[in-house]
Amino acid sequence: MATPPVDLPGKMLNLTIPDKPELYRSYMSFLKHGGLFAPTTDSFAMNEEVLLVVNLPEFNEPRYLRTHVAWINPTPTSSGQPKGIGLAFGDDETAVETKQAIEDLLPGMLLNERATYTL
Protein backbone atom coordinates (compact mmCIF):
# COMPACT_ATOMS: atom_id res chain seq x y z
CA MET A 1 0.00 0.00 0.00
CA ALA A 2 1.31 3.46 -0.90
CA THR A 3 2.05 5.67 2.06
CA PRO A 4 2.41 9.44 2.15
CA PRO A 5 5.86 10.85 2.91
CA VAL A 6 6.67 12.24 6.32
CA ASP A 7 7.21 15.98 6.90
CA LEU A 8 4.49 16.96 4.43
CA PRO A 9 4.41 20.32 2.64
CA GLY A 10 1.69 22.82 3.52
CA LYS A 11 -0.42 22.27 0.40
CA MET A 12 -1.74 19.07 -1.12
CA LEU A 13 -3.43 18.43 -4.46
CA ASN A 14 -5.24 15.32 -5.66
CA LEU A 15 -5.07 14.46 -9.35
CA THR A 16 -6.73 11.52 -11.10
CA ILE A 17 -5.67 10.87 -14.67
CA PRO A 18 -8.20 8.43 -16.13
CA ASP A 19 -6.54 7.41 -19.40
CA LYS A 20 -3.47 7.66 -21.62
CA PRO A 21 -4.70 10.59 -23.76
CA GLU A 22 -5.24 12.66 -20.60
CA LEU A 23 -1.85 11.56 -19.29
CA TYR A 24 -0.24 12.72 -22.53
CA ARG A 25 -1.92 16.14 -22.23
CA SER A 26 -0.86 16.44 -18.57
CA TYR A 27 2.71 15.10 -18.65
CA MET A 28 5.51 17.68 -18.72
CA SER A 29 8.44 15.77 -20.24
CA PHE A 30 10.42 18.97 -20.83
CA LEU A 31 11.12 19.32 -17.08
CA LYS A 32 14.39 17.78 -15.85
CA HIS A 33 12.69 15.10 -13.73
CA GLY A 34 9.28 15.26 -15.42
CA GLY A 35 6.07 16.68 -14.00
CA LEU A 36 2.31 16.87 -14.37
CA PHE A 37 -0.16 19.62 -15.07
CA ALA A 38 -3.03 19.73 -12.58
CA PRO A 39 -6.19 21.70 -13.35
CA THR A 40 -7.12 23.71 -10.27
CA THR A 41 -8.81 26.94 -9.26
CA ASP A 42 -6.70 27.21 -6.08
CA SER A 43 -3.93 29.81 -5.89
CA PHE A 44 -0.30 28.74 -5.93
CA ALA A 45 3.02 30.56 -6.28
CA MET A 46 5.96 29.63 -8.48
CA ASN A 47 8.32 27.17 -6.77
CA GLU A 48 5.81 26.49 -3.99
CA GLU A 49 6.12 22.97 -2.61
CA VAL A 50 3.01 20.82 -3.11
CA LEU A 51 2.29 17.23 -2.14
CA LEU A 52 0.74 15.69 -5.24
CA VAL A 53 -1.42 12.61 -4.74
CA VAL A 54 -1.76 11.21 -8.24
CA ASN A 55 -3.74 8.28 -9.58
CA LEU A 56 -2.33 7.14 -12.91
CA PRO A 57 -4.05 4.97 -15.51
CA GLU A 58 -3.32 1.26 -15.09
CA PHE A 59 -2.08 1.69 -11.49
CA ASN A 60 -4.09 0.51 -8.51
CA GLU A 61 -2.68 2.81 -5.84
CA PRO A 62 -2.03 6.54 -5.68
CA ARG A 63 1.49 7.90 -5.72
CA TYR A 64 2.54 10.58 -3.25
CA LEU A 65 5.01 13.00 -4.80
CA ARG A 66 6.81 16.02 -3.42
CA THR A 67 6.61 18.57 -6.21
CA HIS A 68 7.22 22.25 -6.87
CA VAL A 69 5.11 24.62 -8.95
CA ALA A 70 6.95 25.14 -12.25
CA TRP A 71 4.11 26.39 -14.48
CA ILE A 72 0.99 28.46 -13.90
CA ASN A 73 -1.96 28.93 -16.26
CA PRO A 74 -3.77 31.72 -14.37
CA THR A 75 -6.85 31.55 -16.60
CA PRO A 76 -8.16 29.17 -19.25
CA THR A 77 -6.69 29.92 -22.67
CA SER A 78 -8.41 30.25 -26.03
CA SER A 79 -6.49 27.15 -27.19
CA GLY A 80 -8.20 24.98 -24.57
CA GLN A 81 -5.60 24.95 -21.83
CA PRO A 82 -7.39 24.96 -18.46
CA LYS A 83 -6.53 27.06 -15.43
CA GLY A 84 -4.06 25.16 -13.27
CA ILE A 85 -0.46 24.49 -12.34
CA GLY A 86 2.42 22.42 -13.62
CA LEU A 87 4.12 20.47 -10.86
CA ALA A 88 7.77 19.48 -11.29
CA PHE A 89 8.86 16.15 -9.84
CA GLY A 90 11.89 15.99 -7.59
CA ASP A 91 14.74 13.50 -7.88
CA ASP A 92 13.68 11.16 -5.05
CA GLU A 93 13.00 7.45 -5.65
CA THR A 94 9.21 7.80 -5.90
CA ALA A 95 9.49 10.62 -8.43
CA VAL A 96 12.02 8.73 -10.56
CA GLU A 97 9.79 5.62 -10.54
CA THR A 98 6.72 7.71 -11.41
CA LYS A 99 8.49 9.45 -14.30
CA GLN A 100 9.58 6.06 -15.68
CA ALA A 101 6.08 4.60 -15.24
CA ILE A 102 4.54 7.52 -17.14
CA GLU A 103 7.04 7.27 -19.96
CA ASP A 104 6.46 3.51 -20.14
CA LEU A 105 2.71 4.20 -20.56
CA LEU A 106 3.37 6.72 -23.35
CA PRO A 107 5.84 5.01 -25.70
CA GLY A 108 6.31 7.00 -28.87
CA MET A 109 3.83 9.67 -27.80
CA LEU A 110 6.38 11.98 -26.14
CA LEU A 111 7.73 13.12 -29.52
CA ASN A 112 4.22 13.88 -30.74
CA GLU A 113 3.28 17.39 -31.93
CA ARG A 114 -0.23 17.32 -30.44
CA ALA A 115 -1.08 20.10 -28.00
CA THR A 116 -0.82 19.55 -24.27
CA TYR A 117 -2.05 21.55 -21.30
CA THR A 118 1.24 23.46 -21.13
CA LEU A 119 2.85 23.63 -24.58
Image (cartoon, rainbow, N blue to C red):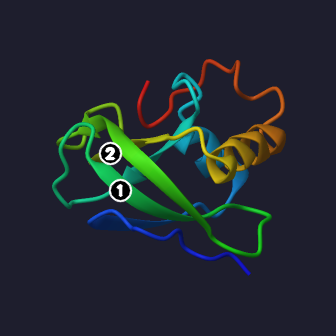
Q: Name the element at disc 2.
A: strand
Amino acid type for the residue under numbered disc 2: Ile
Picture quadrant of residue 59 = bottom right
Residue 71: percent from left, percent from top:
32, 34
Horizontal arrangement in the rendering, residue 86 relative to residue 92 (left or right): left
Picture quadrant of residue 68 = top left
Check disc 1 and report the residue beneath it: 50
Q: Residue at x 41, y 52 (%)?
A: 38
Q: Earlier in the sequence, mark 1 or mark 2?
A: 1
Question: Which sits in the foreground, 108 or 89?
Answer: 89
Question: Which sits in the foreground, 101 or 112?
Answer: 101
* Quadrant holding the N terminus: bottom right
Picture quadrant of residue 56 = bottom right
Task: Give the answer, above or below, for where 26 lies relative to 39.
Answer: above
- Which residue appears farthest toward the bottom when viewing the image? 1
Q: Name the element at disc 1.
A: strand
Q: Kindly report which numbered mark, 1 or 2, lies closer to the viewer in this rendering.
A: 1
Q: Residues within 10 Å of mark 1 (few under 14, many from 20)?
A: many
Q: Residues within 10 Å of mark 2 (few under 14, many from 20)?
A: many
Q: Residue at x 26, y 66 (%)?
A: 10
Check disc 2 and report the residue beneath it: 85
Q: Are marks 1 and 2 in contact (CB under 8 Å)?
A: yes
Q: Residue at x 64, y 64 (%)?
A: 18
